[in-house]
Every structure is written in C-alpha cells, then in structure tokens.
Image (spheres, coloured by chain):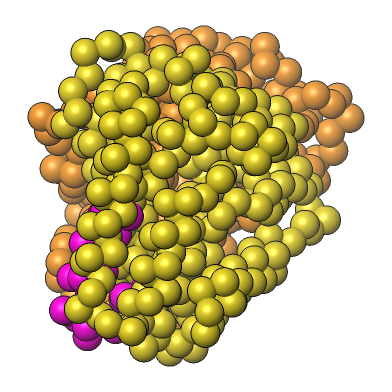
Chain colours: A orange, B yellow
Amino acid sequence: MEFKEQYKKYLDAVENQIDRQFMIEELPQKTVLEAMRYAICGGGKRIRPILVQAAAELCGANAEDAARVALAVECVHNYSLIHDDLPCMDDDELRRGRPTCHTVFGEDMALLAGDGLLNSAFEILSDVTEFKTLSDGELLAIIRCLSAASGVYGMIGGQVVDLQCEERDNVTPDELIYLHNHKTGALIRAAVRCGCLCGGVNQNEKTEEILDSYAQSLGLAFQIKDDILDVTGDEKLLGKPIGSDADEGKNTFVTMFGLDGAKRYLSETTGEAKEILKPLGEKGKFLDSLADYLLSRKY
Amino acid sequence: MEFKEQYKKYLDAVENQIDRQFMIEELPQKTVLEAMRYAICGGGKRIRPILVQAAAELCGANAEDAARVALAVECVHNYSLIHDDLPCMDDDELRRGRPTCHTVFGEDMALLAGDGLLNSAFEILSDVTEFKTLSDGELLAIIRCLSAASGVYGMIGGQVVDLQCEERDNVTPDELIYLHNHKTGALIRAAVRCGCLCGGVNQNEKTEEILDSYAQSLGLAFQIKDDILDVTGDEKLLGKPIGSDADEGKNTFVTMFGLDGAKRYLSETTGEAKEILKPLGEKGKFLDSLADYLLSRKY
C-alpha cells in the first residue's frame, strides 16, 4: 500500500471513532459536549493516533482495537490543546484556522471540556465491551502507559517547564530538550508504545525497542519543525499567526540555534529516526515515509 | 470498634497514602508537584475515601488495596476543587481556611495541578504492582466506574449545569437535584461502588444494591447540609466566608426550600439513608453512624 493510502486508512479510522464517540446528546450539560466536539473535531494532522495504529499493525494487533486506543490518545492531545490555549496559559485565539475553544464557549466551558476529554481517554480504555481482542492486562498496561505520559512526570511536567522558561532568557539547549521531551515527546512516545501494547504485552520486545527509539527522534524532529514553521510558515496553512512563539517570549529551537541551525538539526534528527527503522526492513516503510512527510509538512 | 476509632483508621490509611504518593521531588517541574501536594494535603473530611474503605471492608476486600483505591478517588475530588475555585469558575480565594491553590501558585500552575491530580487517579489505579489482591479485571472495573462518575455524564456534567443555573432565577427543584446528583452525588456513589468492587466484581450483588441506594441518599443529604452550613455555619470552622453561595448567585437547597424546609429535607434524607442500611444489620453500623455524623457536622 502506498503511504498516502495507508495514512488515509488510519486517518479515516480515527475520525470515524471520534465522530461516533463525541455525539451531542440532549442533556442539560449539552454545552460541554458541544465544546468537546468542537475541539476534537477541528481537524489536525492526527499524528498521534496514526502512530498508534501504525505501531499496532506492525505488532500484529487488531485494527479496530488499535483505532479505539488511538481515539483515547487523541483525546489526551486535544485536552492539552484546550488547556494550553486558555488565557491563563498561552492565551491563544486561533488554532487550526478557527477560534479556540474558550473563544467560542467561554473559559469555564473550555476548562471543563478539557477536563472532560482527559477523563474520556480513561473512560474509553476501561470500557472492555468496546474491545475485541485486548485482554484486561493489555488494557491496564495501555492505561498505565498513557496516564504516565500525560501526567506530571510527562506532558504536564513539560508544560510547567515551558511556562517557567518563558520568564527567562538564559534557557540552555538541555533545558529546551527536557521541556520538549516532556511536553510533546512523552505523548508521541506513548502513542507508539500503546500501539505496540495492542499487539500484546512483551510480545515484540525487539520491535518495541526500535519503535521507541524512532518515536523519540520523531518527537524531537516534530517539535523542531513546529518551531521552524512558526517563523517560515504560511499563516493560512498554519491556521494561526506567524511569530506567535516569539510574541509569547517562548524559547524555541530557532531562537536557540538560529533558523539554519534548526533546519540542520531537523534534518539530522529525521535522518536518525529513519536510520533506526532499518532493521525492520519493508515493515518499517510507512513510518519511514511518515518521518519524511513530517519533515516536509507545511502545517 | 467504635465509630470514631474506625473513622480514624480509614482516615489515617488514606492520609498515609496521600503523603506517600505526593512527595516533592527535585525536578524542573517541582512547582506543580508542590501545588498538587498543597491542594491534596490541605485536610478536609476525606468522606469519599472513607466511604471507599468502609464499603470495601463490608465486601471483604483487602484493606491496603482499598486504601489505594480510596487515594485515587480523593485525587479526583481534589482536582475538581482546584478547578472549581479558579477565577473563571467560582473564583474562590479560601478553602478549608487556607488560600486556594491558584491564589498561592497562580492560575496556570493551579490549572495544571488539577489536571495532574485527575490524571494521577488513573496512574494510581493502573499501577498493578501496588495492588496485592485486586485482579486486572477488578482494577479495570474500578477505573471504568471512577472515570464514568468524574466525566461529562457525571461530575463535570453537574458542574456545567451549576454554572448555567447561576445565570437563572427560575431553577426548579428537579434541576437542582439533577445538578447535585451529578456534581456531588456521582463521585460519592462511585466511592461506595469502587469500594464494593474491591471485594470483587459481582461478588456481593445484594450488598452492592443496598450500598448504592445508601450512597444516593447520603450524597443528597451531604449537599443539603453543605447548603445549610453556608448560611448557619461558623466561618472559622468552615474555613471560608459564610454566604458565599448566595454571593455567587448560586441556587441552593436553602434558597429553594427555605432554611426550615432544607433542614426538614436533610433530616428526611438522612433517615432514608439509615433505613436503607437495616438489612445489613451489625455490618452496616459504621455507615449508619457516618450518616449521623454528616448530619451533625459543623464543617
């Protein structure tokens, strides 16, 4: 299967899961359901759920179960975006070319919609009736992996360091990498690991190690590219103003290494990710193409 | 064992779990660990974790496992308090006689500390190495129960309706009860149900039914008492200003039924909770005394 075709297969599977999960019901709390749906149905590249499904397929997992796990990972990602955009955090008004959740629904509903999406991830993963092949032990391992990645020792920890670094101008490269390994990297790594767990706990140890190293390089490359796009991207394609990182006083790979330095770093890190996959041969082809795709993306 | 002694046993067990779980580590994200610890170590009656442990003991569960589940339930409760107190929500400056989390740590850190505590509940419940007797299936059932209660069809849903009702003066008794059944009731019910699940899934069906009915009446009584204390309580004991509900335009059982009406309703609902326990005989003694204790509490 061609890269684009396989990408679309994974994308359709997760979009279908999202659409089915976040229906608007006629309940007194309908507004928060609308806010959640608005946020998570707002498009996006769906990189994390695609990574879950690609890793799962590599590890011989059931595709429907993998799509369900992918849904849970995407819930965590979108909760973090809603909360990051709030006035007391990055105070962003646009995301993916649309007003942010709090701009449309108010701060209170956006806060609760974010809470609701984080919580949803665990409602989804603990609903055993929705899984065809995953055992209780596998689901628990997935919950453990995802909650560790999204918690204070993972993504939330990275967000804390990000906020602290905004107030300083002497941030070191090591700090910047720590920040992104936690803020972005932890969930990307967990996506791949959760995909592997769909194929069974400790079933594919060698493959899992390779995919974990790949995920680490890919996560870093992803963030460097984001920082480059914030400077060189097209506002219409990005769906948000150019230079917003600099406006918010953020330290980025571009402010740290310069534009050329960041581009070189991106190229190296992407090369690393591709190199790591080699032992997988043909089986690693989709993830290899995904690294190229993320390198050349316009948004 | 006397009521006070048993209460203290459960209280000490959960305080011990909290203290052990939320240690401050020397990490770049230390601040959020401090904010979480500040919030969850701020005392409180610990009613929910006590209910978990009492129900678990009734269902023959392992006490240490029950205390661990109790910890997770208390994490969810404290996350909800931090987020409820935020300026975009109830905007409260005092809780349990201390400045609220965002007053001390700032809105951004409080938001993330709340997120971190919600997430912690699922990190705790999926860490199988920390449980002595609970099976994977039992842990998944507990995660399912807790996440359903804390999500948009439970506690978050109730919070949404609460915010919406503040803007209206024609709230009906049915709406007020819907609101509290979700905002407060869902988690109290889940605490009791999670306790039962510690004794095994579908192991104690008759007892579970009785305890679930008890939890529903107790949850309602708990909220009516809260509303009465907001009018008649002692500020020093309550740790927050009297009349803050009215100041925030909240609809309460006192604004709805008058003070005497609310007191009558409290007495009836507490009576119901006690009546429901009768078939349990001596085994229901602690929960019976707990209903009395909550009826006469001063804070």
Marker count (numbered) = 0
Where's residue B299, x and y in %? 56, 44
For residue A71, above or below residue A22: below
Picture layout, residue B196 above or below residue B222: below
Q: Nearer the viewer, residue B139 or A204?
A: B139
Q: Position of residue B37 (x, y in %)?
A: 69, 51
Per the picture, the main secondary structure of the magenta-coloured stretch is helix
Q: Is residue B238 left or right of residue B229?
A: right
- Residue drawn at x 16%, y 79% is B206
Give coordinates of residue A97: x percent, y percent. Answer: 37, 14
Q: Is residue A292 magenta?
A: no
The answer to whether residue A40 of the structure is visible from this angle is no
The stretch in magenta equals: B195-218
Observer-nearest of B143 and A258: B143
Q: Residue at x 32, y 24 (%)?
A: B258
Residue A94 % position (x, y): 44, 14
Q: Quadrant of residue A294?
A: top left
